[in-house]
Every structure is written in C-alpha cells, then in structure tokens.
Image (cartoon, grey):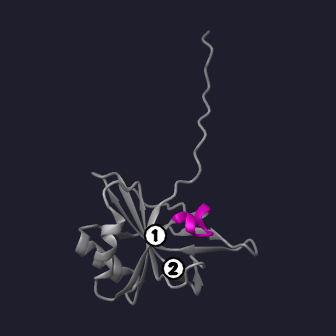
Amino acid sequence: MKKILKLRLEQDEAESMDGIGISTSFSDYRLAWTLNHIFQWRFEYQENPLVIPTRKNAEQRVYHFHHYSDEIEKMELFLVKNKQGGKALFEEFPQFDFVLFFKHNVSFDLDLLLPLIRNLDSIFAAYRCKSDDFAVAPFLHFEYAHE
C-alpha cells in the first residue's frame, strides 16, 4: 500500500487591487454603460452582492456591483457604488461615488487611464487608490456569476 503524501497549500493574504475612485453624477448603470462604450469593456450587473459585516453589531450590509472579466488579459474589473442603502462602503473616502477596482491588471497603466476617465462627461474627479486604502479591504471578496 502506497503512502499518501498530503500537501497543505496556504493561501496568501488577500491580494491588493489597484483602483480608481470616481466622483460623478452618473448612476451605477449609466457609468457602467459609459465605461463599456468608451473602453470596450462589458460590465454586467451582478446579482450576488458584496457582503460587509458592520463593526458595531452582527448586522451585514450588502453592496451591489458591476463586473467585467477580460478572458484574453486574465484581468477582472469591479465597479462598486460607494453609497448604497444610505451607508458608505468606503467611509474613509466619502467623496468617491464609485470605486473601479482592477484585479490582475497587467494591461492598463492607471496613470494613463486616469486622464481619460477624468475627461468623460459628468466625471468630476478621479483618483488612484488601492484596496488596502480602505478599512473594508479584508472583506472585498467579490462573487460573481460564471457563464
């Protein structure tokens, strides 16, 4: 009888995602449509929300988001509206209406992408950030529908 070798693979800490905080008067679907149109992305609204536990009690808050997966570049983008249900997800940055996260980004230089986003109609401001900049960073685990 052969001896079975068991390997334990420990997952690394949560991976930090690059992001762009956006201030705009657009609604979430309008901003997703605009980004899709300008950059040829295909954001889709996700039925499975991002679930964030509150610090004060056992209550959980849910935040809906849009997701785009680029199969060629192996990159994922997440567009999250900051204020949903009267509560800000990214409390440290109340000026952000949305945060656009880039996961596994090797295609875009965000410093070059920023001016393009800032020049879009109804975009008031756009700033670089990382998921680590937010207190909720440990809970930024997006679940989305696979086709």
At x 53%, y 82%, the residue is 84
Q: Label 1 belongs to which residue? A: 47
Mark 1 or mark 2: name the one nearer the start of the chain: 1
Q: Give the Cα separation between the discs numbered 1 and 2.
A: 17 Å
Quadrant for the N terminus in the image:
top right
At x 58%, y 81%, the residue is 88
Q: Are marks 1 and 2 in contact (CB under 8 Å)?
A: no
Residue 82 on image: x %, y %: 51, 79
Question: Disc 1 on helix, strand or loop?
Answer: loop
- Please tell me whether residue 85 is drawn above or below residue 7 in the rendered image: below
Residue 70 highlighted magenta (yes or no) = no
- In the rendering, which numbered label is found on residue 76? none
Residue 36 on image: x %, y %: 27, 72
- In the rendering, which numbered label is found on residue 82? 2
Residue 53 on image: x %, y %: 66, 69
Q: Amino acid at mark 1?
A: Glu
Residue 133 highlighted magenta (yes or no) = yes
**Given the current orientation, which residue lies at the most extreme top position?**
1
Tell me the crowding category of disc 1: few under 14, some 14 to 19, or many 20 or more residues within 10 angstroms, Cα based: few
52 vs 90, nearest the viewer: 90
Specify whether 69 is left or right of 7: left
59 vs 88, nearest the viewer: 88
At x 62%, y 33%, the residue is 8
Question: Disc 2 on helix, strand or loop?
Answer: loop
| Residues rendered magenta in the picture | 131-138
Q: Amino acid at mark 2?
A: Asn
Quadrant for the C terminus in the image:
bottom left
- Please tell me whether residue 132 is drawn above or below residue 29 in the rendered image: above
At x 63%, y 69%, the residue is 135
Residue 15 on image: x %, y %: 52, 54
